[in-house]
Amino acid sequence: MTQKIFVETKTATLFSEQEPFIFECGASLPEITVAYETYGELNPAGDNAVFINHALTGNAHAAFYNSTDDKIPGWWDGFVGNGKPIDPAEYFIVCANLLSSCYGTTGPTSINPKTGRTFGMDFPPTTTRDMVRVNKALLDYLGVKKLACVTGGSLGAMQVWEWIVQYPDFVEKAVNIAGTAKGSPWMIALNEVARQAIYNDPKWNNGKGEFTQPELGLKLARMIAMITYRSQAQFWQRYARERVDESSERYFNFDNWFQIESYLHYQGTKLVERFDARTYIYLTKAMDLHDISRGFDSWESALKRIRASVLSVGISSDVLYFREELIELTRQLRELGINASYREIDSIFGHDSFLIEYDKLNPIVRAFLRQH
Amino acid sequence: MTQKIFVETKTATLFSEQEPFIFECGASLPEITVAYETYGELNPAGDNAVFINHALTGNAHAAFYNSTDDKIPGWWDGFVGNGKPIDPAEYFIVCANLLSSCYGTTGPTSINPKTGRTFGMDFPPTTTRDMVRVNKALLDYLGVKKLACVTGGSLGAMQVWEWIVQYPDFVEKAVNIAGTAKGSPWMIALNEVARQAIYNDPKWNNGKGEFTQPELGLKLARMIAMITYRSQAQFWQRYARERVDESSERYFNFDNWFQIESYLHYQGTKLVERFDARTYIYLTKAMDLHDISRGFDSWESALKRIRASVLSVGISSDVLYFREELIELTRQLRELGINASYREIDSIFGHDSFLIEYDKLNPIVRAFLRQH
């Protein structure tokens, strides 16, 4: 039996009145608090660090356990940990809750010192580039001189792309999984219907006044998203046409759910208990605005900045970030002479595969990290 | 310049107190009114008829024009009409508004003679089999002895499958496009989030009391569905990352939509003006319950009943009814010795291709109808 290893979520307060954090939109805040975890030790050269970017509803707790009460370890424990590809025996691993999230880092749910109330929708619109710039400040604060690797899946992968364009000399290797260098209109469409689910909830009240969680709206937003995180093949395999109540007399009742409906409702309710609707709006908007070429002369001039070795991992059944986009991106990078490769996880688990298919993901990333 | 041809939507009142229509769920109604259109003439043998099954928000008006005010012809005018694969010069073409819809056929928006108010959610749960049984009664009433062809796309295709299992000797050929023989959990999931969008609208009021259209809810339901009717490639091609307002000072504003968002809102609003939320619930539930094997000993025993020649047309980019399901169904039919073939529309227009890609669809169906 393996002993549970316990880790602590710490916080750092970065920036100052004199050197505030300036968002891409132009707004600024004098202080940003960042919640983060670290595993392993930074070497004297400060260049054995790995930064982990989390996805939409993730947090700083990537691996191990926070307390004896925890029934499950951190969200990427299958990929990060002793004997895993991102191993604290080798690396100084940092995972931070991203800007605008609701797990300890400053965002719309934080108290606005000017009003004494939560920022809410007065929080500055945030971009993936803002997130990465805050996390760069965190790494400076921690004494990191260079990232041996930066990685993440989904929204985490989008940040990986910003890292290697914004800080080309700071990153050695980049592993992006199921996430692209600019948001697709497909993703924007799916994010917008999720937001509308929240906006339509009367409790949302246009985001004005005292905040009350729009539970039904956030639940529905999550239900929509959960469909796009898996695949039709996986739904067939796991749920098929099974009913919650298989009795024939309730066959035609509208409230006799299919198991797949029950699954979505369960997942929706679970998110409402642990997430905030305002953060959901801010982070999905950040995904929509995501475009590594913003502010550069051209798409190519942004890509040309990249010096890291780039591994893009696509998922065969991903219906949110289609494999074709990563294949095309890899082609573009290679054409520019950048060390880029594409590998694929062949799975029916869809977008979520990066959180499930460790038997397939880990060997791919291990091989990439071993390359010189 | 081609002259516009005008057609009329007629109604027939079918069944009676003595011989009521009995729904699969066991409920019954003494009268069912059916709205329908016909094009062409029935031959003396009564065997040159083609029945067209429409999709979720369709109606009986498949082709030509109803009035001089009409800016566009019927919903399948590219496929049905003079010189088209379903040609009134050759066939007696019938299209009927399906049971539970809101375009003239009896459904939840009809007046319940017992109460003098609309049925609303007291209308019996309806299945694709119920729809087909009502339409069979219509064809009997019209003197049709045999269908030379039965066809439809999406929910229309689901009804095609019920036709050939329920009335094996009545159908010569069947063309189902982008629709399957039983609802997939993927489709059920997408239908359920659309329904929840309606249920979450306070105007829905649990479907109780005086009905008020839950406009925001129905709009959102449609927005969700519209995403699944196209494809990510088509969204890239048509909308990419274009904004409604491209001015840089509004770049970060949450209310400055991307064009794809504007498209979805426009489509959602349009449906609210022409459709009813109660019908949306009933028809999506019918799709979920759709299973041609219900009541038979096995899946195979249902398929074995089919005597029609079956052409299944899949769409390469369909993310709602995946091509794989139709390929597998065709394989099963052939294994049972049924004359079945699969053809594919290679298109980026996704599920909607059956309403768009006539250059690709029409030759496929023409060739199939010419076969003996």
Image: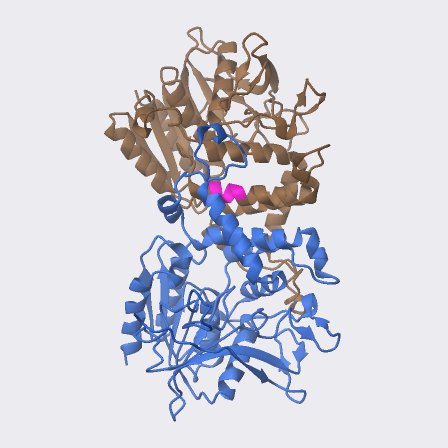
Chain colours: A brown, B blue
The number of numbered badges drawn on the structure is: 0
Q: Quadrant of residue A329?
A: top left
| Main secondary structure found in the magenta portion | helix
- Seen at 67% across and 60% down, the residue is A255
Query: In x, y percent, where is residue A207?
Result: 66, 35
Q: Is residue B144 left or right of residue B344?
A: right
- Seen at 72% across and 20% down, the residue is A116
The answer to whether residue B173 is magenta is no
Q: Nearer the viewer, residue A58 or A31?
A: A31
> Which quadrant does the C terminus of chain A fall into?
top left
- Seen at 50% across and 44% down, the residue is A190
Q: Is residue A26 left or right of residue A180?
A: right
Q: Nearer the viewer, residue B367 or B355?
A: B355
Query: In x, y percent, where is residue B319?
Result: 43, 53
Query: In x, y percent, where is residue B355?
Result: 39, 62
Q: Is residue B119 above or below residue B187?
A: below
> Which quadrant does the N terminus of chain A fall into?
top right
Kindly tell me whether residue B80 is visible in this rendering: yes
Query: In x, y percent, where is residue A135?
Result: 50, 19
Q: Nearer the viewer, residue B96 or A229?
A: B96
Q: Quadrant of residue B161?
A: bottom left
Segment colored magenta:
A188-192
